[in-house]
Image (spheres, rainbow, N blue to C red):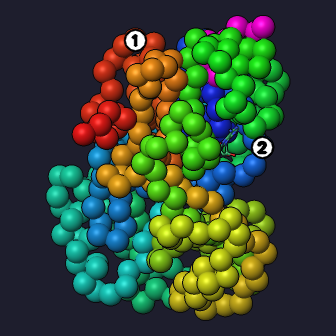
Amino acid sequence: MKNVDYIIVGDGYAAFFFAHQLILHQKSFVLFSADKKGASQVSAGIVNPLVLKKFTTFWLAAEQIEFLTKTVSEIETYTGENYLIQEKIHRIFHDEREKELWLMKAETDELKPFLNPDFETLETIINPFGTGEVNQSARLDVNGFFKGISAYLQDNEMVVKEKFDYSKIEGSSYDGFTFKNIVFCEGMGVRENPFFADIQVIANKGHHLKVKLSEKMKHQYTLKKKHFLFPLNNDIYYYGGTYDPNERENEIDDFKTEELKEGLSAFYPHDFEVEEVNYGFRPTVKDRRPIIGNLPEHQNYYIFNGLGARGILNGCYFSKELYEHIENGRELMKEVDLKRFNK
Ligand SMILES: Cc1cc2nc3c(=O)[nH]c(=O)nc-3n(C[C@H](O)[C@H](O)[C@H](O)COP(=O)(O)OP(=O)(O)OC[C@H]3O[C@@H](n4cnc5c(N)ncnc54)[C@H](O)[C@@H]3O)c2cc1C
């Protein structure tokens, strides 16, 4: 039997950011990875303090961005890389009215830190009304982040590349391990978890394209019109992701590929080739808050889920919330507590 402080089930943002808290506090753990691409691995990596439809912000946006910046610097101390790319989002305006709204909001105390009032007009794309820059926005190098942390976990024998088999768990032991706590971070895979099968997460399917652009951009920005467009490497760009809250099969939906191609053509007037189509299922919650908590009958079984459309900010910030709750007895914020559903 190997004794560990924690077992983590999953390998997306929830699992990796929680693993980081354990590394930081020198707790022993083993992480189970089914070695399949979840929502995190296909995500765009956008870190954005705004809701770009309405030019509003959201709960804890500034605190979350500050905490993410600190966390990626901590991760850099053991992987050797900082995965946060300082490329700003440029929102392509649809009309004059949107520009006026942006300027008006840029004068409010809440939004002033995020809305840059100096507009730009960019080459290569269609943007007759120009673009507005989102201050404090950035992008995570998603591929680098998962590769770098996975390599560290493997080198330190902290990962088991196996699907966690729920039938093998007995009290505080699992297949040759004993643990103090277990944290389930399976995203939509939670539907197979018999302990938390009834948690209220809704799958929101998202597709993205990897496209080869015939005309390269002359700037280093993340563009946003209907979806996000940004460079990956050479002439390959990421464009996505779509949203679809309907129950869908585990396969590419051709109508979403078409939607993406149309969305890109609306502001990119040159040829492009679709190199790849990928999709994932975001674990979303009706009240748009993560879900954190434990079971009354198994107090050391925890859930960390419901990261929604903001997996990076939510995963990073609330991993600390969960850690403090388990190790130091700090009360969970009521907004994210699993108990809010016990009504
Ligand atoms: C197209 C798209 C674009 C997105 N873009 C962004 C973005 O730009 N910025 C942002 O912040 N968020 C973005 N998101 C949202 C973000 O990806 C999700 O919020 C996040 O991935 C959820 O993380 P998670 O760890 O909870 O779940 P997941 O990423 O789904 O990870 C769960 C993992 O656990 C594994 N697993 C499940 N069951 C088991 C088991 N029994 N044993 C072992 N492993 C198991 C699964 O294989 C999976 O890899 C995007 C999502 C999509 C689909």
| Residue that mark 2 sits on | 35
Residue placed at 29% from the left, 69% from the top?
54
Q: Nearer the viewer, residue 256 or 109?
A: 256
Q: Is mark 2 within 8 Å of ligand 1?
A: yes
For residue 284, say whether it is visible: yes
Q: Secondary structure at mark 1?
A: helix
Q: Position of residue 17 (x, y in %)?
A: 56, 33
What segment carries the magenta color? Answer: 1-7
Above or below 320: residue 241: below
Callout 2: few (<14), some (14-19), or many (20+) C-alpha neighbours within 10 Å? few
Q: Is mark 1 within 8 Å of ligand 1?
A: no
Three-letter residue code for mark 2 = Asp
Quadrant housing residue 184 = top right
Three-letter residue code for mark 1 = Asn
Residue placed at 22% from the left, 78% from the top?
100
Q: Position of residue 210 (x, y in %)?
A: 71, 71
Quadrant housing residue 228 = bottom right
Q: CA distance from mark 1 to mark 2?
A: 32 Å
Q: Nearer the viewer, residue 174 or 87?
A: 174
Q: Position of residue 68 (x, y in %)?
A: 48, 38
Residue 329: in magenta span? no
User: The C terminus lies in which quarter of the figure?
Assistant: top left
For residue 23, say whether it is visible: no
Task: Tell me, for residue 328, which label it has, or none.
Answer: 1
Residue placed at 52% from the left, 42% from the top?
197
Q: Secondary structure at mark 2?
A: loop
User: The N terminus lies in which quarter of the figure?
Assistant: top right
Q: Nearer the viewer, residue 34 or 135?
A: 34
Q: Earlier in the sequence, mark 1 or mark 2?
A: 2
